[in-house]
Image (cartoon, helix red, strand yellow):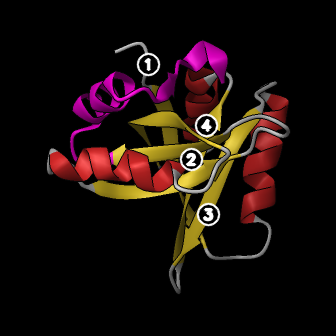
Amino acid sequence: MEELIEQLSVLLENKVGRLAEVAQILEEADVRIRSMVLADTSEFGILRLIADQSETAYQALKTRGYTAGRTRVAAVGVGENPGGLRSALALLEKQTINVEYMYAFPRCGQENVMVFRFDKTEEAANILRAGGFRVFSPSEI
């Protein structure tokens, strides 16, 4: 589905310099990071990122020995008014679609955008679009 965006998930050792190394690898590959979030455990972290050249980023990281996976996510405009996120989630709750995780996608001076991973991502994107929410395509990110 064209509206879904490819997100890379990279396993990082919880050690000084690992995130900087990933940033350097992506810089050397001429990849721009559009959004990212890092969640940690005591020994490892999971870096989730959206890049302008997902395949190039994936190959560059794999070549340097990083464990990376690919996931389709939905970037959804939830507006700027209070209740935008709640309205989107209410539509999905009615269809028993679960949010596995989400994070913000910064767009200065524009509408708020959330990146979602759902248990049924394509179905969720269709429901949100039909409900009047904007689902961003990869070319818009």
Mark 2 burial class by Cα count in 10 Å: few <14, some 14-19, many 20+: few
SS assignment at label 3: strand
Q: Residue at x 77, y 34 (%)?
A: 110
What is the crowding at mark 4: few (fewer than 14 residues within 10 Å), some, or many (at least 20)? Answer: many
Q: Which residue is mark 3?
A: 38
Residue 50, labelled with which disc?
4
Residue under label 1, please give it: 3
Comes first in the chain, label 4 or label 1? 1
Mark 3: amino acid? Leu
Alpha carbon of mark 3 to alpha carbon of mark 1: how far?
Answer: 24 Å
Q: Secondary structure at mark 2?
A: loop
The kind of residue on which mark 1 rests is Glu
Task: Answer with the quarter of the image where residue 88 lies.
Answer: top left
Secondary structure under tag 1 reads loop
The question of residue 111 being in magenta is answered with no
Q: Earlier in the sequence, mark 2 or mark 1?
A: 1
Give the answer, above or below, for where 133 lies relative to 22.
above
Q: Label 2 belongs to which residue?
A: 65
- Labels 3 & 1 near each other (Cβ < 8 A): no
Give residue 2's position: percent from left, percent from top. 41, 12
Observer-side mark, 2 or 3, equals 3
Identify residue type, mark 4: Ile
Q: Quadrant of the N terminus?
A: top left
Tell whether 21 sits left or right of 86: right
Mark 2 or 4 closer to N-term? 4
Q: Earlier in the sequence, mark 3 or mark 1?
A: 1
Dividing the picture into quadrants, the one containing residue 106 is top right
Q: Categorize mark 1 by other alpha carbons within 10 Å: few (<14), some (14-19), many (20+).
A: many
